[in-house]
Amino acid sequence: MRYRTIADTGIEVSEVGFGVWTLASGWWGEYTDEQAITLLRQAFDRGVTFFDTADTYGNGRGETIMAQAFPGADRDEITIASKFGYDWQSTAGERRAGHQEAPHRLDIPFLEQALEGSLRRLGTDRLDLWQLHNVRMEHLQRDEVWTFLDKVKQAGKVRSIGVALGPAIGWLDEGIYSLTELPVDIVHMIYNALELDPGRALIEVARREHKSLLVRVPHSSGMLEGNYDTNTTFAEHDHRRHRPQAWLTNGVKKIEQLDFLTNGTRRTLAQAALRYVLHDPSVVSALPNIYDLKQMEEFIGASDVPGLSDDDMRRVAELFESNYGLPREVEQAVAR
């Protein structure tokens, strides 16, 4: 495993991290606590030190399973990121239609409770990274929020601050504003070899501003793992079931055109997809969706294979611009 450092913080992260959302949300399958803890420990044993969760994942479960997987003795060996901003507790027990978001809330008493709640569930006295979760521009422009975040940072309860863009792909304006106008250390975005925008624009800004980026969904909801065909079906509660059929049909045709990323190399397609998002050093970690040991080992192995060339990156961009010679799909906003 190779490691990178969040700009100007001294905080080290494994370049392949672990997004706990996969284990806690139920959107990628159901995991018992024992199964989830086992996968987290297996990742740690193989060099993964960066774990990204949120208070809203599984209504706190994404944090409590972290505490069980990594008791106090391991705390200094891992880097923990969590997120805040959703008032999920007021709607706990309610079933929201589809992937509808919980309401946002950012008043200071709520933020104080959110931070203390995350620290308690995680069993720790500090967060290495605390991220505003899928907030809108109006939230980013609240001065009192940044005053509070500076206060908890000075108190040592939070080591760095980030903005996680979403829930679906997009949010270019929020990303640029965060990188250029706010005291954030990192912006967390969706970016992959099939979905270049707005990620490539944010990479340019981050490079210019000497800021860092995190990438989630580096495999485009699994498409870039190379295991789908046109007959692939997803379980009832799997979020990919809600995507249009054209996403699957055209996606399979697209990845057939990416064989140059693996031919004559030691890389699998899934590993090439990770090397793609890690090509620019502004991206300090990629957070693939890890759901079994075999897949985990393949992803972690991406840290040991050759990187992509500038020519590889150019060819991917050219295919994206032409939509791989396929009709443009109607994008459906699906939380990821």
Image: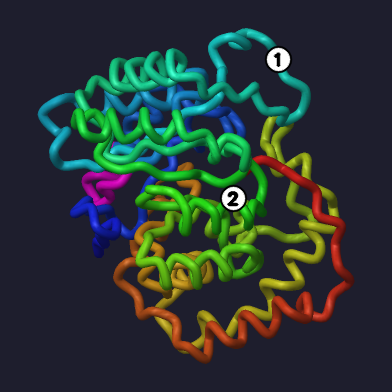
Residue drawn at 37 percent across, 32 percent down: 147
Residue 11 visible? The answer is yes
Quickly name the residue at label 2.
174
Whether pointer 1 and pointer 2 mark residues with C-beta atoms closer than 8 Å, the reply is no
* Nearest-to-viewer mark from 1 and 2: 2
Q: Secondary structure at mark 2?
A: helix
Q: Amino acid at mark 2?
A: Glu
Residue drawn at 47 percent across, 34 percent down: 143
Image quadrant assignment for residue 39 = top left
Span shown in magenta: 41-50
Which numbered disc, 1 or 2, marks the residue that appears first in the sequence? 1
Q: Amino acid at mark 1?
A: Arg
Neighbourhood count class around disc 2 (C-alpha, 10 Å): few under 14, some 14–19, many 20 upward: many
**Which quarter shows the N terminus?**
bottom left
Left or right side of 230 for 51: left
Left or right side of 23 for 93: right
Spot occupied by residue 192 in the image (x, y as percentages of width and height) = 57, 64
Q: CA distance from mark 1 to mark 2?
A: 29 Å
